[in-house]
Image (spheres, helix red, strand yellow):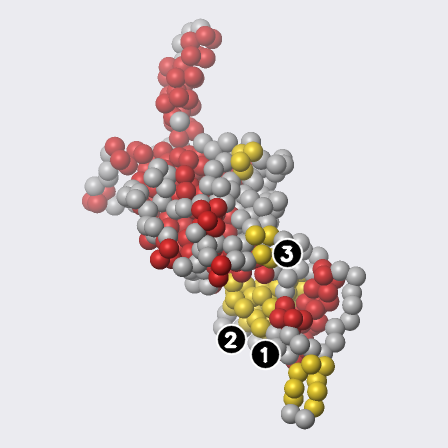
């Protein structure tokens, strides 16, 4: 349909359906690539005739994008076979047309000026292919987040899957020795064929996996999952920003609760939408999960107990209420346990309370 208006255009998939971090039912992100139309010689030979394409001038690239998507959206709505629920979301930072394709069951997002997102998909693909623990950890964390409504399919103040993926990559860059290299390091390994500048942003990184040395880190997935929760349960979100480019905390440039630097447009925060409340929920659940995994190292339940353990223990929806999926009382949340521990050591003097509190908070960290 796009080619009816823009002969020679291409529609390319990106996002989780191609970067190997997708699961069944994820949306299909598509990018309508009009770039090379302009670059092609506008005169095209068609037999004996000379065909010429002309595009009218508009005040800005954004307006051009909105106009193009508006037309394609109308066209999909009226004539797209099986395309239903077409929404034109043209005032978003990145304008898009959203629709469902009935025959395939796909929820589709179509954009046109999103070339950098293609590069981030490629980068995530590289990270996913570098070490088998990456995708396993990302899927575990995404699954955990979904089970506790930290993420949602409805747009809002929630953490997104993309943000969680960058958090996992960042965490793996912080291990010692690192499981994953930083983006800056991948840039140093790049050859001439990898060079890529998009709208003034340097998107260069090595794309040949053979040029990247495997990690010397041998930590198990079980340990990494526990450490992930420990790490982000205690991360200084109030002052630090997450950057997979440098692979270390940066000073937060603004006051948004969660700051995750866009890998290629480094002035952008990919989690600008996240509210303080949603971030706090993530932190509380991360601490709770770290505690549960820590306890399991101490008293591993026997299989005959018929109780979920390991990752499964973290997925029961009643994590915060302390009940197991069978309805039995499992464990009280860490915050409650700490409170009752505090109560139990509370002495007659206020000083003793303060000391007790200090000792406990050191122990629980
Ligand atoms: P999505 O939000 O659809 O994420 O953005 P996703 O990775 O496909 O994950 P799910 O499974 O749909 O939840 C699609 C792509 O757009 C880019 C990323 O490359 C992402 O993979 N993107 C998204 C950005 O560059 N910046 C953003 O703020 C969001
Ligand atoms: Mg997607």
Task: Tell whether label 2 touches label 1 (CB within 8 Å).
Answer: yes
Question: Where 290 falls versus 13 (above or below)?
Answer: above
Please provide percent x and percent y for residue 106: 51, 68
Distance from Cα at disc 2 to Cα at disc 3: 37 Å
- Which residue is under mark 3? 199
Question: Where 35 falls versus 276 (above or below)?
Answer: below
- Which residue is under mark 1? 81
- Which residue is under mark 2? 103
Q: How many marks?
A: 3
Distance from Cα at disc 1 to Cα at disc 2: 9 Å
Q: Is residue 224 visible?
A: yes
Closer to us: 341 or 113 = 113
User: Quick one: SS at disc 2?
Assistant: loop
Q: Is residue 222 visible?
A: no
Q: Is residue 352 left or right of residue 120?
A: left
Q: Which quarter of the figure has residue 82?
A: bottom right
**In the image, what residue occupies the spot 44% across and 46% down?**
185
Closer to us: 269 or 287 = 269
Front position among marks 2 and 3: 3
């Amino acid at each position: 349909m796009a080619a009816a208006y823009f002969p020679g255009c291409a529609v390319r998939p990106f996002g989780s359906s191609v970067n190997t971090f997708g699961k069944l039912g994820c949306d299909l992100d598509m990018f309508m690539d009009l770039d090379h139309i302009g670059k092609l010689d506008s005169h095209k030979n068609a037999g004996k005739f000379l065909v010429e394409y002309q595009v009218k001038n508009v005040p800005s690239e954004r307006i051009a994008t909105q106009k193009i998507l508006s037309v394609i959206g109308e066209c999909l709505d009226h004539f797209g076979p099986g395309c239903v629920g077409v929404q034109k979301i043209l005032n978003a930072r990145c304008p898009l047309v959203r629709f469902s394709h009935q025959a395939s069951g796909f929820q589709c997002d179509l954009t046109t000026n999103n070339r950098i997102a293609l590069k981030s998909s490629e980068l995530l693909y590289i990270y996913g292919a570098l070490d088998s623990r990456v995708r396993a950890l990302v899927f575990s964390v995404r699954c955990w987040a979904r089970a506790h409504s930290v993420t949602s399919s409805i747009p809002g103040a929630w953490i997104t899957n993309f943000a969680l993926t960058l958090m996992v990559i960042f965490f793996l860059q912080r291990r010692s020795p690192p499981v994953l290299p930083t983006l800056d390091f991948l840039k140093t390994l790049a050859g001439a064929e990898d060079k890529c500048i998009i709208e003034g942003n340097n998107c260069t990184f090595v794309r040949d996996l053979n040029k990247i040395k495997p990690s010397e880190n041998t930590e198990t997935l079980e340990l990494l999952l526990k450490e992930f929760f420990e790490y982000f349960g205690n991360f200084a979100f109030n002052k630090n920003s997450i950057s997979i480019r440098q692979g270390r905390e940066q000073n937060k440039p603004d006051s948004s609760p969660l700051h995750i630097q866009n890998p290629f447009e480094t002035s952008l925060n990919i989690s600008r939408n996240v509210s303080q409340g949603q971030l706090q929920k993530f932190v509380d659940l991360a601490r709770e999960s770290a505690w549960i995994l820590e306890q399991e190292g101490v008293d591993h339940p026997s299989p005959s107990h018929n109780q979920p353990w390991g990752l499964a223990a973290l997925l029961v929806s009643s994590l915060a209420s302390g009940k197991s999926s069978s309805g039995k009382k499992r464990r009280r949340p860490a915050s409650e346990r700490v409170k009752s521990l505090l109560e139990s050591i509370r002495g007659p003097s206020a000083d003793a309370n303060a000391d007790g509190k200090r000792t406990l908070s050191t122990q629980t960290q």
